[in-house]
Amino acid sequence: MMDETMNRSRGGSRLKIFAGLVALAFAVTLAVIVGSRLSDEALAVLAGAVCGVGAAIPTSLLVVAVSRWRDGPRAPPMAPVPQNPYPPVVVVAPPGGQPGSHAWNTLPPSFGTPVQRHFTVVGGSSVDTEMVAYDR
């Protein structure tokens, strides 16, 4: 009875190894066929993508390892801090010098006045002498 179980598990593991080798051979053959038909630029892009993924895998594994290490079990604090049963009171008061208005918040008058702006047009017949002024 034990021998049959051992033989089945060996056969299953051999089948898994064989399936893995067949999949690897298929992937390599497909890569060779596709690689021989692609242009040099496309191969360069593909190689860059593969190298980028290869560089990202160890980094992501390191991030996962560090985050699991930080989220590990921690010792409870020595003594609980007594908490105040009342929440803190925050008073927000408007500035004293300005009366409250119910209108829309607008910019102060200094920002609202139009300013004359000068633009230089680049290109054209007379670049150095041409100056255009626009009002807002």
Image (spheres, grey):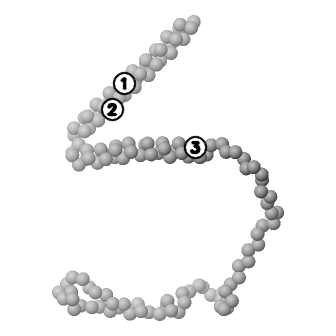
User: Which comes sooner in the sequence, label 3 or label 2?
Assistant: 2
Q: Is 101 positioned to the left or the right of 125 in the image?
A: right
Q: Position of residue 127 (x, y in %)?
A: 21, 87
Local SS, label 3: helix
Q: Residue at x 59, y 84 (%)?
A: 105
User: Which comes sooner in the sequence, label 2 or label 1?
Assistant: 1
User: Which comes sooner in the sequence, label 1 or label 3?
Assistant: 1
* Cβ–Cβ under 8 Å for marks 1 and 3: no
| Circle 2 residue | 27
| Circle 1 residue | 21
Above or below, comparing residue 82 to residue 129 in the picture = above
In the rendered structure, which amino acid carries the disc numbered 3?
Trp
Q: Residue at x 65, y 89 (%)?
A: 101
Where residue 46 sits, quadrant-wise, is top left
| Circle 3 residue | 69
Q: Position of residue 92 (x, y in %)?
A: 71, 79
| Residue 1's disc number | none
